[in-house]
Image (cartoon, rainbow, N blue to C red):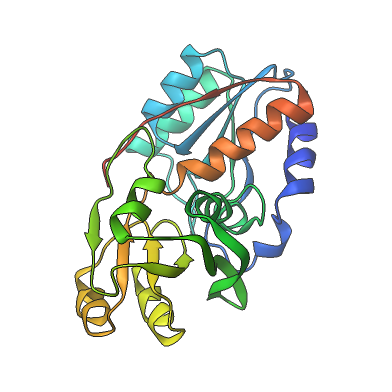
Amino acid sequence: MTTAQLDSFYRSILDIEGFASTDSSLNGLQVDNDGTEVKKVAFAVDASLESFKRAAAAGAGMLFVHHGLFWAKPLRVSGIFRQRVKFLLDNNIALYAAHLPLDQHPAVGNNAVLGTLLGIENPEPFGFHHGRAIGIQGKLKTPLTVQEAAHCIEFCSRSALAVYPFGEKINRTAAVISGGASELAVEAIEQGIDLFVTGESSHSYYHHALEGRLNVVAGGHYNTEVWGVRSLMDLTAQKLSLDVAFIDVPTGL
């Protein structure tokens, strides 16, 4: 497929346009190729040089990432940024990015998949950003301890960064928002949620969680955001019959 056709496919799934004015990431096709048809798409969390090198080694013509190259303002094409762009151009690899549109998607999004792993039933909106709910909340099909919840969302047996058992021993409700969203612990407390699952922990909200008797799992920014990328990878292979590959470059953060 051409990059234009792939762009149309991803836009038919993800709300790229809907987040254009509120997401600092330049969602969509960030770096194009020379028009060559793409026969294989690689998927990774981050637009790093290591991810690019592994995508090239895998023979991919496009790399789909959650965290792209462009954020908020233009960058000078120098230093590390120049090296990354040059590698893509030299190897004729297109780069596609989807940040909040992938977090938010109700089926293949990071938070939707995390919710499924935890067993959240009939998910409802949680964690609003400029009027759009990015995360989900709901009742757990099977009540879990905070340690059991942490185990449910492990990727490749990588343990959560932090587990804070500040609330009841058994959790019956949970709110989920991947990545760096520790400030939404306050919203979880206000809504009477038992368990808050996110990516990063934060010193600033430790005492909020403690005093609000909120159980928290900080699963890791990277580990909570592999899920949407991998889910969309599976959908790409299923719908387009293209070869795909997952590029795993964990940060431990």
Please determine whether, in this image, residue 183 is positioned above or below residue 121: below
- Residue 220 in the image: state x and y as whole percent: 32, 50
| Residue 20 shows up from this direction | no
Which one is nearer the viewer's eye here, 144 or 68? 144
Horizontal side, residue 150 vs residue 12: left or right: left
Horizontal side, residue 27 vs residue 171: left or right: right
Give the residue at x 56% y 66%: 134
- Residue 244 in the image: state x and y as whole percent: 61, 22
Which one is nearer the viewer's eye here, 226 or 61? 226
**Quarter-wise, where is residue 83 in the image?**
top left
Quadrant in the picture for the N terminus: top right
- Residue 91 in the image: state x and y as whole percent: 53, 17
**Quarter-wise, where is residue 93 in the image?**
top right
**Quarter-wise, where is residue 155 in the image?**
top left
| Residue 140 shows up from this direction | yes
Give the residue at x 45% y 47%: 225
Please determine whether, in this image, residue 189 is positioned above or below residue 123: below
- Residue 129 in the image: state x and y as whole percent: 54, 73
Horizontal side, residue 39 vs residue 8: left or right: left
Horizontal side, residue 138 vs residue 108: left or right: left
Give the residue at x 69% y 54%: 16
Which one is nearer the viewer's eye here, 142 or 71? 142
Give the residue at x 47% y 12%: 57
- Number of on-image labels: 0
